[in-house]
Structure formats: C-alpha cells, structure tokens
Amino acid sequence: MPEIEYKGQKIEVDEDGFIQDPSLWNEELAEYLAKTEGIEELTEDHWKVIRFLNEYYHEYGIAPMIRKLCKETGFKLKYIYELFPSGPAKGACKIAGLPKPTGCV
Amino acid sequence: MEALRLGVILAAGVCLVGLWLRLRHFLSLPLARDLSRARGSARRGARYALTLGMMPWAKESTRKHALSYIRGVVFHLGIFAALVALVAALSGARPVGGSLLLAEVLVGAGLVAGIIGLLERLARPDLRALSTADDYVAVLVMDLVLLAALAWLRDPAAVGWFYALAIAMLVYIPLGKIRHCIFFFPARIFFGRHFGHRGVLPPAVGGGEAR
Amino acid sequence: MMDKALEVLERRLSRQLAASLETCVRCGICADSCHYYLADPRPEHVPAYRAELLRRIYRRHHDPVGRLFPGLVRARELDDELAEELIKSAYGTCTMCRRCVLNCPMGVDNGLIVRTARGMLAALGRVPKGLQDTVDVHLESGNNMAVSEEDFVETLEWLEEQLQDEVDDPEARIPVNQAGARVLYTLNPREAKYYPLTILAAAKVFYAAGESWTLSTRAWDVTNYALFNGDDEAAREIAGWLAQEAAELGVEEVVMAECGHGFRAFRWEGENWLGRSYAAPVRGFVELVAEYIRTGRIKLDPAQNPEPVTYHDPCNQARNGGILEEPRYILKHAVADFREMHPHGRENFCCGGGGGMMAMGEFAEGRLAAGRVKAEQIRATGAKVVATSCHNCLDQITELSKHYDLGIKVLNLCEVVAEAIILPGDRQ
Ligand code: SF4
Ligand code: SF4
C-alpha cells in the first residue's frame, strides 16, 4: 500500500490515490489531495461540492448520483466538470475522502 | 544397413502412432460452437488464415521481422527437402543432376537457418526465458538430420548416419514440439473461423486497415 | 487446494483451447505486438510467456511427456507460487486485447489462454479485489455501481428535462420500460452516476433519428466485468438478465452503449455462455448511428467539430468485435479534420486500460507505462480530440493525456455526433 506523508502523519492511500480510511479525512487533507489532482486553490464552490459528497457518504455509505450533487449544490453539470477537471468520481470523490468506486472509473 | 533401414520404417510407424494418440486426445475434447450471429464468414476467414493470411505482409509481426520469417521458411523448406531425400534413400533412389543440386541447396540453406535459429534461441534472453529443453532438443535434432541429409546427398556412404538420425527424429516428433506439424492446421483454422465469423478477417479493402 | 482451478481447466478444455496450447513453437515473434513488451521489453512481457504459465499446468495433466519427464517440457503442478505468478501475468500485465493473436503465425489464441487462466484464479477466489468487487456489486445490485432503481429513474427524468431544453421540444422523451419499442438501449452505470452527458448525447441522436427506443429499469447495464475476471458463471448470469429483458419487451434489437467490453461480452460471447441464441439481434451504438447517417435519418454538420480528431479503436469493438468501418464513416461525416493513427483498425494498439485494468489499482503503474505506445500514436497525429467508443478507453486515454502531457480532449463518438447534429426543426 502506498502512503502519503501529510503533516508528519503517514496516511494510507490506494494506488489511485484514494485514502483507505475515510475517518482520517479532514479539510486540510482535502486541500492536500486537491493539489494532487491539479487543483491549486479550493474555492467556496469546490467546498460546497466536497462537503456534500463527504456528508452524503457518511450518511449512506455510497457516493451520491451526480443528479443529487447538482440539485443540492445548485450547480450545472458542466460547471462541476470545470471545478474538478478529472471528473466527479476520480476528482471530487477522491478529494472528499470517498473510497474508489467500483465499475468503469 | 538393412537393419537401420528397417529401423527407420519402424520409427516412422512409431511416429504415426504417436501422432495418432495425440490427435485422439485432441479429438476427444469438445468442439466449442459459436452461437452468436455471424457478421462475416467463418469459412472465408479460415480460407484466408491458411492462404493470404500466411503471407509475410499480412501481419505486422512478420512485416517487422521479415528476416526471422524468411529464416523460418528456409528452415522448413530444408526439412521438407530432407524428408523427400529420406524417402528417396529408403527406396534406393538418389537424386541426380539438377534435382541433386536443388536438394543440396535447400537442405544446406535449411541447415544454416536451423543453426541460426538455435543460436538465436541461446542468445536472446526473452527467447531463453520462453524456452523449454524441448525447444532446444527439437531444433538440434532437426539440425542434425539436415546435416546428415546433406552428407548423404554429397556422399552415399553417409546413409547410415542419415538413417540413425532419422530414427531419432521420427521417434521424437510426437513427443515434443515438432508435433505442431499437425496442430498447426486446427489452430490456424480455428483462428480464421473465429475472426472470420466476427467480420474481422479477411481484411476488406478500404477503411479500418492497418496500412 | 488447487483442485477447483484444475476443474475449471478441464471444463473449459475445448479443441480450440487445446489447439492453442499445443501449437505455440515459442518463436517469440509475437513479442513486440504487445504494448507491454514495447514499453518495457522484459521476457515476462512476451505474450507467449504468459501463455506458457498455463501451458506448464496443461502439460502436467495432458501431456504424457510432461507427466513422465516434466523437466523436458517444463511441466509443473499448479501451486501457490505459480498462482501468484499467474495473477501478476494474466491480470497484471495483459489487457486481453488479443493483438498478439492476430500476429501469431500459428494462430495461437493467447487471449483465450489468459482468460482461462483468469477463470482458474477466479475459482480460487484470487481475482484482484477491485475487479472482483465490480463483478460482485453487479451481481448483487443488477448494475456495477449499485445505482438504485429510484436513483436511476430520477436521473433519467432529470435528463429528459435537459433533453427537452437542448432540442427545444417539450415532447422529447427518454422512454423507459416501453414494451414493443424497436430498440432496447443500454447504459454504462458511470453514465447515470457521474457522466450523464453521454446519455443526453445518445438520447439526442435517437430523438433526431425519430427512433422508437427504450431503456429498461430492470436490465440496463451494458457492462459485464465477468468477461475480465474470467468467471463464466457470473458472466452467464449477467448476460442472461439483458437477454431476458429484451425478450420480454419484445424489441427488434438490443443496442449496446459505447462500451467496448460490454459490446464484446453481450454481442459475441453471451450466447455461448448461455448456451442458447437470443430472441433479438444485438448491435453496437456505432453501427446504428452509421446506419442513420447512411439512410439520411440524421444529418450532420462537420463544421461544428472543427478541431483535428483522431479515432482510437477499442480492442473489444474493433479487433474482437468487427466494428471497423462504421466509426470512420461516422467521423468523416461528423468532423472537419479526421486523422487516422497508425496502426489502426484491427491492428490498433490497446490503450492499456482493457481487460479490467482500470479496476485493478495495484497494476496502475504498469498500465500507464504500457500506455506510452498509445500516447505516442496519438501525439503523432497532431489531433486535439481523440474520439473513441468505450468509457474505459476514454478514462485511460484521459489519464495518458495527463501523464504524457498530450493536451487532448477525449470524447465518445456519441458526443461528437450529438455536437454535429442538425435537428429536424433546423433543417432547411
Ligand atoms: S504465440 Fe505464436 S508468435 Fe508467439 S511464440 Fe507462440 S507461436 Fe510464436
Ligand atoms: S492480449 Fe494484448 S496485452 Fe495480452 S499479451 Fe496479447 S498483446 Fe499483450
């Protein structure tokens, strides 16, 4: 298992960079993960998406549908892809501390 | 000499029985039928696989490695020539004149190609990793048969060597990889039928082509 | 302990498989037909080397010489060590693209051999986790991302509204569970879950063509990852759902969304897994779109796609599925500047993401390294857009673009076509 070193703490991630233990997630870690996805600065809009994903995951144990994400944040689809260039699954979910989804992603 | 001659005939029998046993095992296995709807034609695919599909320009691998391909062809031609020579020797005939020269050239070239093949297998790390002892033995046996055939073509006195090595070869054929001489055909036909059925082969003229 | 794996070998040992196991002469000429070998020319990356691992077991059980003199032909019993090596080889460094098969002078089907090896490992429960999870989720929930029926329906309703906006017609529909529709269409769960723009694009094409089509809420997942984990039982079950739904809805044909392996699995392998023929024929979306263009049911304006575009053939759709001409025909009508990469068509290189590789994170490094071949092919075309016809290829090529700094955009064909479509109302 690869690890990332973050604030002197070693955190296990899988080979695609998804953190292994969602309970270790916090907002500073999200900023760090965002950089690995090529997002230098997390804006308020980024945070809106990230917080929703994280809360939804903790409640239901699964990532929400993109439709719910659009509805809850009020963002248009295309805007979400702009916010997270590597996409909602590999980009946003990873930054929000969700595990890698199954299927074609 | 007569004993060796009989030995060859006996070994040929052993070879045939061995190959028959191999074939029997093969035919005891179920044939996987393809229930999907055809897009192309299995039959045309198989015909292609056995004809134009064998041409050196038909595949990227043989286009890139034309020399290896030619080496293989020369080696196999030499073997066929040596087998013809063996039959001639057994029936007390000897090629003369033009056909002698042709036989010498084919067998001689086949021998050179076979030796290169053996050296290449010893020298290239990827081939070494791929090879079993059988891969070396099979080519070595063939090379020795080619050498003996060449000797016999040049000097009838070498017939004893020719027979002795032919016996070794014939017994070895069903045991090792040389049995691809029979399995080549079903493998190639299955390949052609499979890709023919799916409309992938034979290549159509026009788009979707590699070149 | 290994008995289960050996049983799988015995069960699947057809004449086709045996011919491929018997015929290889270890000439090695297949070596550089494999993108793994090209990117990193190690002996283990020679296609025949992968096949040899299974051949060792085969010889131990089916070759008298292998039984009596195992050393002569490297016959070997399947043990833990060999199983580990098989996992690395059959799952870890082979995308089952079968490019080597086309390049073998003997016709050896290394793809069939690798899938058999995978099936044996599956029987031992040793499929890499990400891949096995995907199959398990599919078996449990009916689709490989556990999208609930409620979420699925809501998403389609939401998309229907967007379609109506897009085509400016309040009557535009995304039909669901319509018995008697002509076409049953399928989706990749990732479309519903994360990337719905391709659903919208396909719906727009159907709308423009005036097609009678439907989706089903009972069986709609185009994928079948059991093609890749090698488990025939699972593959049969998954293929069976769609086959049954098509029969129940009484459609004229099933059309597979742009998903390379899903197309191959259902179009070419499914009936063989099930042991019976389907009620209705199966086509790929690309085949249908090419027909729409040919028969004038949709009209395209190539000027809408002015950037240079190249096409990546998904292995499972082209070399393993026969769809060679249609994508080119479509692109020549849909984009202004189409460029082929070389080689292409049946001889294309795998992008590196096939064989379920995207689901197996543990092999990601090798996957990206082996993708170099595709990256260089793309770069050489100078294209700004890579069109393909598979979500898996799309993701891998997107990653390649990042990794090798290609600066390209990757799209499925439906998106390229939807962009160029002239809607019936706008036609002069
Ligand atoms: S698979 Fe074919 S090309 Fe490769 S080593 Fe075997 S015979 Fe030669
Ligand atoms: S199927 Fe593709 S990836 Fe696998 S060995 Fe053959 S060429 Fe390589």
Image: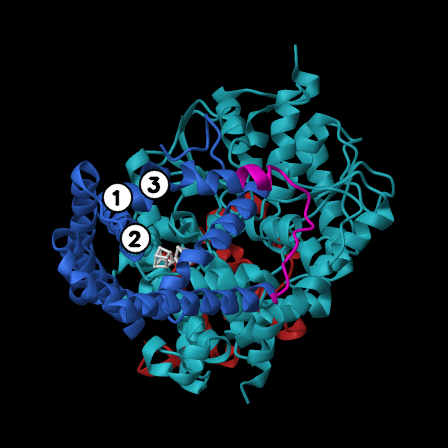
Chain colours: A red, B blue, C cyan
Classify 10 Å Cα crowding around label 1: few (below 14), some (14-19), many (20 and above). Answer: some
Q: What secondary structure is found at the residue carrying circle 3?
A: helix
Horizontal arrangement in the rendering, residue C346 relative to residue C147 (left or right): left
Image coordinates for residue B162, horizontal then vertical, percent:
22, 63
Q: Which residues are magenta?
A: B28-45
The mark nearer the N terminus, 2 or 3, is 2
Type of residue at label 3? Ile
**Nearer to me, C53 or C309:** C53
Residue beneath label 3, please?
Answer: C378
Residue beneath label 2, please?
Answer: C32
Q: What secondary structure is found at the residue carrying circle 1?
A: helix
**Nearer to me, B24 or C172:** B24
Which residue is depicted at the point 20% across and 66% down?
B160
| Residue C406 visible at all | no
Which residue is depicted at the point 21% across and 40% down?
B99
Image position of C109 with respect to C349: above or below: below
Q: Chain of mark 1?
A: B
Type of residue at label 1? Lys
The mark closer to the camera, 2 or 1, is: 1
Horizontal arrangement in the rendering, residue C305 relative to residue B126 (left or right): right
Classify 10 Å Cα crowding around label 3: few (below 14), some (14-19), many (20 and above). Answer: many
Residue C398 within the magenta-colored segment of the rendering: no
Q: Are marks 2 and 1 on the same chain?
A: no
From mark 3 to mark 1, how far is it between C-alphas?
21 Å
Residue beneath label 1, please?
Answer: B64
Q: Quadrant of the C terminus of chain B?
A: top left
Which residue is depicted at the point 30% across and 53% down?
C32
Image coordinates for residue C292, horizontal then vertical, percent:
66, 26
